[in-house]
Amino acid sequence: AAHRIRSLIHKRLGIHIKEGKESLLRQRLWKLIQSKEFKDLNEICDHIENEKDSSLLLRLATLISTNHTYFFREKAHFDYVQTHVLPLINYKSSKIRVWSAASSSGEEVYSICMTLADSLGKNTFMDRVAILGTDISQKVLQKAEHGHYLKENLHHIPANYRLNYIDPVSKDTFCIKKELKNVCLFRRLNLNMGRYPFKQKFHIIFCRNVFIYFDMATQESICREFARNATPDGWLFISQTETLRNLNVPWEYVAPGVYRKKQ
């Protein structure tokens, strides 16, 4: 049954669960049975095969592919946006549109936010920036929209950003300032859905620490969709530990984890 669900997750979501993760998958499945949601593994399989919205499948995939995230992870990327990417974007003629394609609980989105606000100044930032965060999990998107985090996450945020862009909530929590949250939109999206439903193009796309879950064919189709939804001079950021080197995709390497759309 676990193998059956593994192949369903791969077929519907494009997420490749490695052999070593099968035991984790089984643990999650047994939890569903113990919680009395289902009587056995076969009933879970039948439910997944018949459900129209893939909600249970999404729940399982989210539990297995949960990725630890924090503010300003791989900070070199945010520095690169500030020093190399922003000077090349003509934001006077249109808004700077940024997409965090696997935004999890919002840390990446708000790290981008703080970087752009610091570079452009508050007024220009609020007028000229639109940031979209998407994820497969509704639960993490709700946390991202809320914008509240534990104080232990503060040390990843540069001191001047802490001063300007966050508010204390209690002795244990802080929140992202409202003016930053106002330029962000969070929506659920399955990256393996085929054509993405966007009407406007993005100048910058972040999709970091995600490709490890996808097989090569899925990685290629996602990268092509990213290119289709990027501006002619669009930028793509993946993790510094990932590479597009072996993929047939319309992106060219610029720096570790940094790619530019091929002209």
Image (cartoon, rainbow, N blue to C red):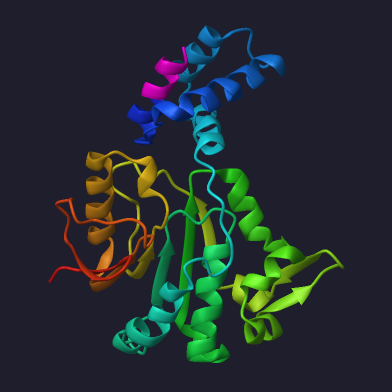
Secondary structure predominantly adopted by residues drawn in magenta: helix
Identify whether 135 is placed above or below 155: above
**Residue 41 x/y as whole percent:** 54, 11
Left or right of 262 on screen, residue 123: right
Most foreground residue, 134 or 34: 34
Q: In which quarter of the image is residue 152?
A: bottom right
Q: Mark yes or no: residue 95 visible.
A: no
Q: In this view, does 231 lie above or below 127?
A: above
Residue sitting at x 67%, y 17% = 37
User: Seen in the image, is 171 located left or right of residue 56?
Assistant: right
Report the span colored magenta.
1-7
Q: Where is residue 18 in the image (x, y as percent from the top left)?
A: 39, 31
Name the residue rendered at 33%, 84% in the picture. 84
Q: Horizontally, is 33 left or right of 250 in the view? A: right
From the viewer's perspective, is 261 left or right of 198?
Answer: left
Q: Position of residue 63 (x, y in %)?
A: 56, 36
Q: Is residue 26 visible?
A: yes
The residue at 38%/36% (across/down) is 15
Q: How many marks on residues?
A: 0
Residue extending furthest toward the right: 171
Residue 136 is situated, as x and y percent measured from the top left of the image, at 49, 44
